[in-house]
Amino acid sequence: MLKSIKVEKKYFQKLDLSKLPSPCYVIDIKVVKENLELLNQLRVNTDVKILLALKAFSLKYLFPLMSKYLDGVCASGINEAKLGKKYFDGLVSTYSPAFKESEIKDIIKYSDHVTFNSKSQMDKFKNLCFDKNVNIGCRINPLYSEVEVLKYNSSNLRSRLGVHSNRIKELDFKYLNGIHFHSLCEQNFNTLQKTWDKIWPFIKNFTTSIDWINLGGGHHITRSDYELPKLIEFINEIKIKTNCKIFLEPGEAVLFQSGVLIGEIIDYIDGNESTIPNIAITDISPICHMPDVIEAPYKPVLMNEPEDQGEKIILGGVSCLAGDIIGEYNFNSLPKVGDRIALLDQAHYTMVKTSFFNGVKIPSVAIWDSDNDNL
């Protein structure tokens, strides 16, 4: 998550914040189903295999529902592989920048695909995978990315993620079942097309030796302006061109705009009327509950914020980190201590990153159905 995205789902306007504990993540099952149904349309029209990125969302309560629409999960190591194998129907595909020798046998045990980050790790562990009939993949760095924030750009020249595309020929294709690349972040179709155009000259001579190509994540498929027809046409074309199965690993797209984080104003710090707004202390902490606000950085959307009018308030967190600030927002009137607020699009990359830093309370989790108001 790199930026605030225009709010498209309005269902949370109907949610009674007073019925919930604070802080609390709330997932609207209706939005999750809408996202899953759209992704299923893509599957039906292309036969693409879609895996949930557990690094973005790993609430096992929803896995039975997601399993009906998706083909499995992608894991980032032993713990996510175990989680996926136990609670999610379908394939488990595991990738890590490096696998520890002490864990690799268990990773192979719980995985259907194991994707290596380097030639050296692939050479070291390929026989173990081969003996257990586990698919072997290798991550490729296309050396092309349009992600502007360097810490989210996985395909630059100095990235530690993947074998450089111009060195693919050095891999042992006798053992290799597939290749994987991931260079997108919250992006539309055109970036995928341009990335493919960069990598195709390096892989075209090897596609007869492999069974699948994994196009990674970062595809913002469920956003209203995503060019889905172009993606459908593209996948069908490269399936014919390569004779390979095609995989996608969305995380954010599965949960896009399906969740909010509810908090409560618990105190005020008086600002300087001429230069600094009042600061409201909330029981939400960016560093503890939504660290991408600090890391990216970005400002989450506040539900019901008026545009450029009203009282300006800085919303801060409850930890003792000086920079634990959510952002500056407009309110129709000065909110009172005890009032609730809701920050939008807080399902993905929030619960999975929540920490116990500073002993701050972990939010509750609620599943809500905006169709019938069931909590």
Image (cartoon, rainbow, N blue to C red):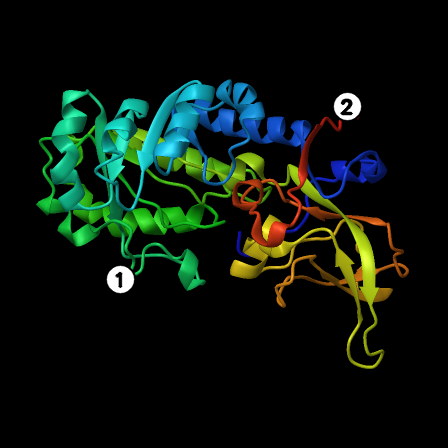
Sequence-earlier tag: 2 or 1 = 1
Give the SS element for disc 2: loop
Percent position of residue 319, x then y: 65, 58
Give the SS element for disc 1: loop
Rendered image: mark on residue 215:
none
Percent position of residue 35, x then y: 58, 31
Percent position of residue 14, x then y: 82, 35
Question: 309 above or below 287?
Answer: below
Q: Which residue is mark 2?
A: 374
Question: 69 above or below 321?
Answer: above
Q: Residue at x 38, y 47 (%)?
A: 192
Question: 295 above or below 222?
Answer: below
Q: Nearer the viewer, residue 36 or 299?
A: 299
Q: Which residue is mark 1?
A: 157
| Discs 2, 1 touching: Cβ within 8 Å | no
What amino acid does circle 1 point to? Answer: Leu
Crowd around label 2: few <14 · some 14–19 · many ≥20 (10 Å): few
Crowd around label 1: few <14 · some 14–19 · many ≥20 (10 Å): few
